[in-house]
Amino acid sequence: MGGGGGGLSEEQMKLEFTPTWIVAGVCSIIVLISLVVERLLHRLGKILKKKNQKPLFEALQKVKEELMLLGFISLLLTVFQGAIQQICIPQGWANHMLPCNREEESSGNEGGGATKEHLSSQFLVGVLGHGGRRLLSSGEFGFEHCQKKGKVPLLSLEALHRLHIFIFVLALTHVIFSVLTMVLGGMKIRQWKHWEDEIQKDDIRTSSIKVRHVHQFEFIRDRFKGLGKDSLILSWLHSFVKQFYGSVTKSDYTTMRLGFIMTHCRGNPKFDFHKYMVRALEADFKKVVGISWYLWIFVVLFLLLNVNGWHTYFWIAFVPLFLLLAVGTKLEHVITQLAHEVAEKHSAIEGDLVVKPSDEHFWFNRPRIVLYLIHFILFQNAFEIAFFFWILTTYGFDSCIMGQVGFIIPRLVIGAIIQILCSYSTLPLYAIVTQMGSYFKKEIFDEHVQQGLVGWAQKVKKRTAHKAGNGTAGNGVAGNGSASATASQEPPASSVKIEMMNLLAKKKEPQNGAS
């Protein structure tokens, strides 16, 4: 059974012939690493809850869900790898839509390209040790099984394992890039805090009221480009260029802040708009950090189109760039539209310049669409970077699947541009401009007020349903019985007012309120 030089055979390396101290030691290390990561995530969650960072805590829970999904995918691939390997297809089917040309690869191997294949196999063995050799030998078994039928395996065990690694790298890269974008964008947004502090100190609402020409306002001078078709084109061009420098100025912030307050909380001119904006952005973060079902569809689509000679990934790299430029231009143009609305209706303004937020300024009257586009942009960019590093570490820089250098370098440059532009321009723009919709977000209230409002709404819904049921049951009663049933269906306006007053009173008690 033993090989030359006293080595162990493949049969003797099976689990039943492996020393128990090796099995126990390896299991202990794996369990220890898993517990350390789990405890670190749990500790981070406790810190976020202690600091009342519920949106970030929910984002952390989303990351845990993604890790659980990856674990389930890993389990499925492990359990069904044998069955997948034994699925055989006609050899002709395996010659279409290949990432690499078999003839080129064969000629490359004859000219020294065999080294690449050797390194590729060595990478698998290096990652999995003897398990890698077992994968290679098991792949040969699957090939022999299908060869007897005159067919080829649907997917080799080695290819299945490498696909497994790519899915893990993709999810990890997406989470890292999303966190990096939020951290850099948050740093930019927090630079606006001193504007909020200056406004709070100056109390511009109590300043002297005077009449000024509309073009005396800095916001109008910077954003209003005149009337007519030429001015429309000029305003779009200005919005496109504006996203690259000074995307949000102090006059923009001051004007949009005042427009939001006068529309949604007129009775509280000291409302901390910056704090509300940061809370709303943190709440949206849990959406950005996750991988939705439609993003997995895009992954499958991209893998399908990775055909030799198509250079699909080079052209796909431009998709998030164009989308990002379109989103940034649109957000800047929303600010421009706010200025145009005021300048077109007024020649002079008494007091402060007040804009009117509206959903009509956004695509399909839905500001939320911008968040979905940013989510897709970040995921697509992470996909590009993850795919590059996966190919680099698995097959090498000179492999056919990597492509030509002339197509690789532009993809990396575009990825860096997207990351920087999205972090320092588009995300801060999204944070403030999407507040210019017709409705405010629930983050305008503190956490305990949000819970109180949800509970109150549920009570009203149950009460309405209960009284509607009583009214239906009393339809057969004539005379005063019917009248009393109708009267009982009237909404208890006094009780609603009392509950709302109690909620608002609770909101004013803590010092860290929204106002």
Image (cartoon, rainbow, N blue to C red):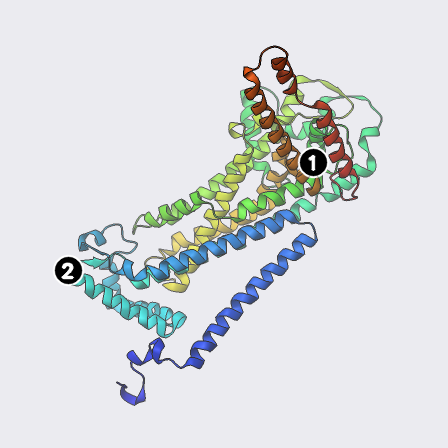
Q: Nearer the viewer, residue 363 or 11?
A: 11
Residue 166, given in percent of the width and then of the height, sits at 41, 58
Residue 402, given in percent of the width and then of the height, sits at 36, 57
Q: Residues within 10 Å of mark 2 (few under 14, many from 20)?
A: few
Q: Secondary structure at mark 2?
A: loop
Residue bearing mark 2: 149
Between circles 1 and 2, the one closer to the viewer is 2
| Quadrant (top left, top right, bottom left, bottom right) of the C terminus | top right
Asked if residue 374 is positioned above or below residue 110 in the image, the reply reads above
- Kind of residue indicated by mark 2: Lys
Q: Left or right: 343 with respect to 367?
A: right
Q: Which quadrant of the view contains residue 505?
A: top right
- The tag on residue 253 is 1
| Quadrant (top left, top right, bottom left, bottom right) of the N terminus | bottom left
Q: Which quadrant of the view contains residue 474?
A: top right
- Kind of residue indicated by mark 1: Tyr
Asked if residue 207 is positioned above or below residue 485 in the image, the reply reads below
Q: Tell me how far mark 1 sits from mark 2, CA to CA.
A: 71 Å
Q: Residues within 10 Å of mark 1 (few under 14, many from 20)?
A: some
Asked if residue 371 is positioned above or below residue 365 in the image, the reply reads below
Q: Residue at x 63, y 58 (%)?
A: 44
Q: Residue at x 62, y 22 (%)?
A: 226
